[in-house]
Amino acid sequence: MKTNYIFITGGVVSSLGKGITAASIASVLESRKLNVTIMKLDPYINVDPGTINPIQHGEVFVTEDGSETDLDLGHYERFIRKKMTRHNNFTTGSIYSEVLQKERKGDYLGSTIQVIPHITNAIKKRILQGSKKSRISIIEIGGTVGDIESLPFLEAIRQMSNDINKKHIFYIHLTLVPYISVSKEIKTKPTQHSVKELLSIGIQPDMLICRSEFPVPKNEKEKIALFCNIPIKAVISLQDLDSIYQIPKLLKLEGVDKYICNYFRIKAPEADLSEWDTVIYEESHTNNIITIGIIGKYIELPDAYKSVIEALKHAGLKTSTMVKIQLIDAQKIENNKGIDLLNNLDGILIPGGFGKRGIEGKMMSIKYAREKKIPYFGICLGMHLAIIEFFRNVIGIKETNSTEFDPKCQYPIIDIISNNKNNKNLKATKKNKKEIPIGGTLRLGSKTCILDKNSLVEKLYGKNIIIERYRHRYEVNHQLLDQINISELKITGRSKKNQLAEIIELNNHPWFIACQFHPEFTSTPRESHPLFIDFIKASIKFQKTNNNINIKNN
């Protein structure tokens, strides 16, 4: 079986939604029973996004095999059923790193190393490797045409039309067709110039997807087709929609999947989008409205918590609930004046994160949720802080902390994973965390977790052995597990060899669960995650109970 390649480039401006578009096209093609995969090629010099500040680049999405990847891979997994791996995302930095390592070993036999052919050959090799066993491979090129960083990628995909045969290569260009409100006109000139720039690189697009505020009229489509030298059927209008999950249906109505299948001469059944029809129906039919507060420190960019936000919305779909997300800066809570920000929340969630900034504000939020009986969901860092808060304010050990925030703390309830295995005393490790490399040193990917029988989490999952995805460097001090279980704070999930605490529950609370793993990475609009679903159910119950109490008091 020959693999067919679809390359998606962007023009005019960034943030047009290439990732969502790529995922939506893949979803429609997958619904035609085709084996589809998606790749993301990022032009930045970082080896991977693992060390990039989320405010700059959004969240880091973790794959099953433990790769730290671009957030677009989260979109891919939410739209298609195939799981992403380390082969589905690579950067300019990783390519140059690989080529330079080979050069140092003498693999190039003394040749002068150049962008062409050495860098472009490495890019093509990665594309071929990531596309194996797929009938169609969709490759999204990060950035926009004209960016100096993207040129090696664009040159590589240009070469592939000669290497493989153009009949197995399809180029899609995503552009902006702006609406000028003053003149009430849709302008096609930016698209024409973007295509001209792409042509100067040697790539003639086979399809144009035109992002616009409103549907692109037929006259403008004809104009774009004429000036850009493509059939009018290949000019696709993609206007703004209320929901990203409506995009697959729109693309099908525009004939995208049919055009692509005809181009590749693939015979496949008609696209069955009934599952997406169900998702759209669930979005538009809700009986409840609740507000969930996400307490974090990267709130300037909501994409920093993209998977968490989407997972909450997915749970809303399955509970007929509109979930309003309130991003709250943890630092604003630390001065006590900001605690009022939590007053009208129906649930509190603290997601994963790194570093000391905002920690005290997050623990104040946990204390507030614990005492006010508000549903609390802690993820990764949110579990660490829940344990620290409990030890400080319930057990009374005020010196409890994590060595991430205080390397010399007297009672390191949270410590580097490798230290926890041997640290038998409640004494701070002498390991200097600055000696530990930042990139590529986390516990990553899918791991097995064993759930306690008769625990709430076992009931929610419907089984006692689960597999979830992790991304962390610090863990609960292994020697304190028994001490924690003496109290009402119970460890109800453990690692396969019983060395690490993975889930905690608070018994005397309506809903207080925190986990070391990241359940948001496996939530999809078609199949929401059980922990998120029950968290939303608990938040609905809290809201209704709280409203009844207020009515009685009034």
Image (cartoon, rainbow, N blue to C red):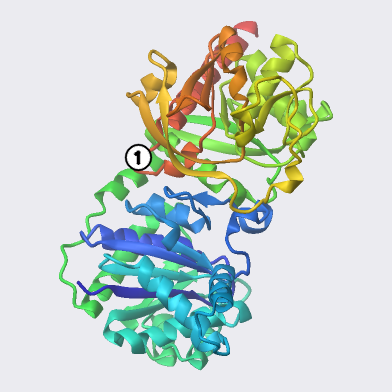
The answer to whether residue 287 of the structure is visible from this angle is: no
Q: Residues within 10 Å of mark 1 (few under 14, many from 20)?
A: some
Judging depth in this view, the residue of 104 and 348 nearest the camera is 104
Q: Is residue 471 left or right of residue 232?
A: right
Judging depth in this view, the residue of 441 and 66 nearest the camera is 441
Q: Which residue is drawn at the image coordinates 58% and 45% (left, top)?
A: 442
Q: Quadrant of the C terminus?
A: top right
Q: Is residue 240 left or right of residue 304?
A: left
Give how far across and how far down residue 413 sits, in percent: 68, 24
Q: Say which amino acid is labelled 1.
A: Glu
**Rendered image quadrant of residue 185:** bottom right
Q: Is residue 361 left or right of residue 148?
A: right
Give how far across and how far down residue 475 sits, in percent: 60, 31
**Location of mark 1 (residue):** 527
Q: Secondary structure at mark 1?
A: loop
Q: Quadrant of the N terminus?
A: bottom left
Give how far across and how far down residue 284 sits, in percent: 40, 42
**Rendered image quadrant of residue 509:** top right
